[in-house]
Image (tube, rainbow, N blue to C red):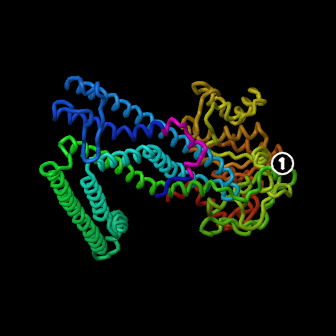
Amino acid sequence: MSRLAAPRSEPEASGAWTTYIWASLAGLLVPVIVGLVGLIAVLLDSKGFVGNQVRLGTHLSIFLPEPFTAQRPLVQLAQLVGITFVVACLFSLAVWLHRRDADSKARNVTKSLHRKVLQQSLRRAEIEGAAAQYVRAEQLIGTHLPAIQKGLSMWYRAVPRSVLMLVGCVAVALLVNVWLALLAVVSGIMLWQLYQRLRYRKGDEIANWEVPRSRRRMAEIVGQAPLLARLQTQGLADRSFESELDSLYRRLTAEESRSGQLWPLLFLATSVAVAVLLLGLGANLLIGDSGLSVPSALVLGLALGGAIVSADRLAKLSFQLKESEPSSDAIYLYLQRSDDVAPSEQRVGLAGLRDSVRIDDVTLKDSTGKAILRNLSLQLTPKSFVALLGTETVSTRALTELIMGFGRPTEGQVSIDGIPLLDVHPQALARNVMWVEPSGPLWDGTIAENIRGGDEDINNRDLVEVLESLNVYEQLQRLSEGLNTYVTVGDSLLSPEITFAIGIARAILHKPAVVIAMEPPPPAEHLPDDPSLAGLKRLAESGALVVVLPRRLQTLRSADRVVLLNGPRIAGEGKHAELLSNSDLYRHLNYLLFNPYRHQK
């Protein structure tokens, strides 16, 4: 059984010793409660204790103090019931405290792993690219970490509590009657194995995959049937649908037949096991001389019931661990440190952009080996406004990520002022390269805090002037708290136009050497002037390199230079008018992206 050893070795997994006390207490109190119930049964059966020793089976004897046995039976009963109730309350308290501690420990471990995923995503982005981290994080945080938390919680709740409960209850059952206890344990194991064999047969996984596939295929045929009817296919859709329908119901019939046999066979097997146990119990009660009585039989039954409950919990734990272990492997494989990136202390700083950003013969491939960029060379200088337009969004986005220091080329090199980008300290890149997109991007905080970006030296006058130049100040002031309005990631309170302007305002105030912007789609109404575009041009005029992924024709017309990509390769460079004259591909892209009459034909 895999035991989530890696998550349990995290520093947050080391809990207080009281956790193990509550777990041990909860596991050991169940056999004690079983013994107390047995004493109550003996008292009721014999209407009083005779002597100081009470036998509850072949080898199980409980010694009672003489002052207790000297009391009247009713007083004895009241005291036993009171003691049993107190023990039951202590058991409930121990279970509650242990469950609370187990859940808290599992929660602390997974919270720590969440933070480690965030930190590792920053490191991995330098090799794999920033966009790839979203896909990985979505799977890790949405699927794997919850599975680890559930597995850890079940582990801490079952170990050692359920183990001690199982051992204690089996020990009590063996002391009552060895042969009946062994017979019950062997019968239970055989029934469990029979259930597993009947429920999980070879080919079940294939059937579980084929049934949904058949349903999807039938839905596709229904959607295609009207179109196929226009192609004079002479019943092709009907025949395909009928074939899938027959195949689906053959599988469903086989599944229903197997399910129909499962419970009758299990019931029959259980009946046989119970009958054998009852015969053995009856032989001991009626003709045996082993000291087994009705109270002893009650203790035996309760002990076996406790053993079954604890065994069931351990079986569920085993199943959950099988589900959680692949998630643990995925998390720790992601968190595994790589030597491909130099440690931060070995990297250099960056004092702005003086010469150029050079991309020399760069090839970048995805995880399948497909080229995203191939043999791409480009030189980008400060005080320029560059638009990147391509046939594939992934290629233009990958190129901007490379400039930001995310992703490692398979071949070639990206450098700033002759310094390889991978040798530049991440904090130096953060100060000199800024990303702007339709979401800002915003983080949780006030609008003013989002624009300042932690720089308290930016005064209110400069902030207001920039927002006024971008034509969004009045709109922001109309909000409930003005610039002090609290916004969150993905907030729908602000339109993409406003959040994009907030990102540009942040760039204007911080004056980074390189600004990379992804434009939002154009608004429904035509604007003769675009304040956001004017803000980007203002950044370029002030000395920055501005690289834009354009969504508007006006941006292409305003660009000092347009870089055209056809798939992974550069297909042309120049001003908008030049490319319109010289490139069929560029004219076609302009028609597809910006012709307002294309969708009306």
Q: Is residue 214 visible?
A: no
Drawn side of residue 88 relative to residue 412, left or right: left
Residue wearing tag 1: 349
Residue 488, horizontal then vertical, whole percent: 58, 36
Location of residue 284 with respect to 242 vertically, above or below: above
Location of residue 132 with respect to 254 vertically, above or below: above
Q: Residue at x 30, y 75 (%)?
A: 236
Location of residue 306 with respect to 100 vertically, above or below: below
Q: Residue at x 67, y 67 (%)?
A: 568
Magenta segment's dominant SS is helix
Foreground residue among 439 and 423? 423
Which residues, given as a range, are shown in magenta? Answer: 6-20
Drawn side of residue 343 relative to residue 147, left or right: right
| Among the 4 quarters of the image, the one containing residue 323 | bottom left
Q: Is residue 7 magenta?
A: yes
| Among the 4 quarters of the image, the one containing residue 129 | bottom right
- Count residues near mark 1 (Cα–Cα under 10 Å), then give few for <14, some for 14-19, many for 20+: few
